[in-house]
Image (spheres, rainbow, N blue to C red):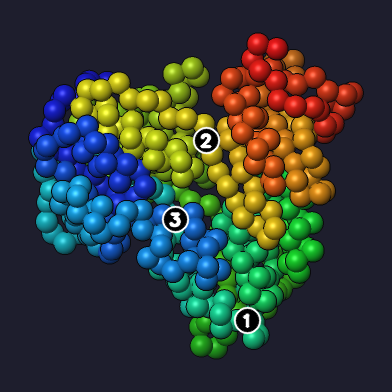
Amino acid sequence: MAAAARHPGRVVVVGASAAGLAVVEELRRRDFAGEVTLIGDEPGLPYDRPPLSKQLLAGEWEADRLLLRSPEQWDALDVTYRAGTAAVGVDTDARVVRLADGGVCGYDALVIATGARAVHPPALGAGLSGAQVLRGLPDALRLKAALAGSAGGGRLVVVGAGFVGAEAAAVARGMGVPVTMVDPLPLPMVNVLGVEIARLLAAVHEENGVDLRCGTGVSRVTTDGDGRVDGVELADGSRIAATTVLVAVGARPAVDWLAASGVPLGERGRDDGVLGVLCDARGQATGTVWAAGDVAAWKNPATGRYVRAEHRLSATEQGRAVGAALLGAEPTPPGLPYFWSDQYHLKLQSYGATGRDMAFAVVEGAPAEGRFVAVYGHLDADGRPRQVDGVVAAGMARALRGWRQAVLDHAPWPAQSPDPDLAPVNGPVSSSS
């Protein structure tokens, strides 16, 4: 890919996200004195999204606590902010972004940081009163109000037992709202965390009163005579009454506005949609276009594969890397993927790669006790793990730090007892062991 201008005069960032903000801050931190424009389709200042399904939904935080920067910090960045204005197209030859209000914005370097959009199929009630997704602040406030109204009667049906669905179900139960959670997979979050931790999550949700319906999907959302949601019909033939349906079946990169732009987009396949904006290992898509965050698929130099790192910390790290690279500096490579999830008393944290198809071992504590550290490893051609590639923990923050370092060091897979998948082992090991 061709190198971008070392000192672009005008940088336009589309997406008032964590990644977009990180680009802006990195440019200013490196004393970039040029013109910076940030375009965002929501009103207000950039805010953090992970707390939407946790602290904000639970009523522990007010919306202003989600702001990524205070108004004073924002003003110091000296940015032209086009809030509440969606980008609807790009002319990469003319170097112009087209806006929904009919305006245009010229650039020397364009950074795409538009994140991802929640998937809401028509069969799952898209457009119906009482059926919604949870991706932005308006979604969270709408769901919060619906849950408050359901605490004295009614039921929340959550379609999808991933991060957002499981966290929202936990919050709703904490408010006393009856909850049914449905997922075609056999256990909550099983593809991300594997069978043993997924079993733990299923047990915790059931102990807290969730009607868990795994192994079946939703055929359709039903409505009453006024056109409002009143239930869901499942693939197994059963029906569940509902006053609110939360659809949490995933998200796809927000790239519709880039159609026919010439910006390279990768395809996952007919069912999975667009992979994202294809970038090199620094976030560069074309000579003048870059991308960061959930919308971006960066090329892994080791494997040659394009990967989207859909994690909050990765978005910030990628944004900083792009900001540095735009000015010709050598960017710091993004660190380990990281996520956290609050579900009842469990505070799950994870670094690195995890998944159902990886080797798994509990290395400290015990999942049944809610305090544990577990590691994951990719399998080689012989079907055996060679190193520690990821870690998940709950209730053991100090131990987690040591195992995080083991992931960074590509530490050898720990020695363990005859059951290689589930047996506990002792203590983190260094790469020199």
Which of the numbered marks, if any, corresponds to residue 151?
Answer: 1
Across and down, in percent, residue 104 comes to 12, 51
Residue type for callout 2: Pro
In this picture, is 67 found above or below 79?
Answer: below
In this picture, is 320 found above or below 140?
Answer: above
Residue 134 left/right relative to 161: left
In this picture, is 326 found above or below 365?
Answer: above
Residue 259 left/right relative to 90: right
Report the Cα–Cα distance between label 3 and label 1: 25 Å
* CB within 8 Å, label 2 to label 3: no
Residue at the (35%, 43%) spot, across then down = 19
Q: Which residue ends up furthest to the bottom in the rendered image?
A: 225
Residue carrying label 3: 49
Q: Which residue ends up furthest to the top in the rendered image?
A: 432
| Secondary element type, mark 1 | loop
Q: Which residue is more in the foreground, 411 or 287? A: 411
Earlier-in-chain disc, 2 versus 3: 3
Residue type for callout 3: Arg
* CB within 8 Å, label 3 to label 1: no
Q: Give the class, few, some or many, for how many residues have Cα within 10 Å of label 2's Cα (few <14, many ≥20).
A: some
Residue carrying label 2: 337
Q: Give the class, few, some or many, for how many residues have Cα within 10 Å of label 1's Cα (few <14, many ≥20).
A: some
Report the Cα–Cα distance between label 2 and label 1: 36 Å
Kindly indicate the quadrant of the structure image that contains residue 83.
bottom left
Identify the image quadrant of the C terminus.
Answer: top right
Q: Which residue is more in the foreground, 135 or 50? A: 50
Across and down, in percent, residue 50 comes to 49, 54
Kindly indicate the quadrant of the structure image that contains residue 274.
top left
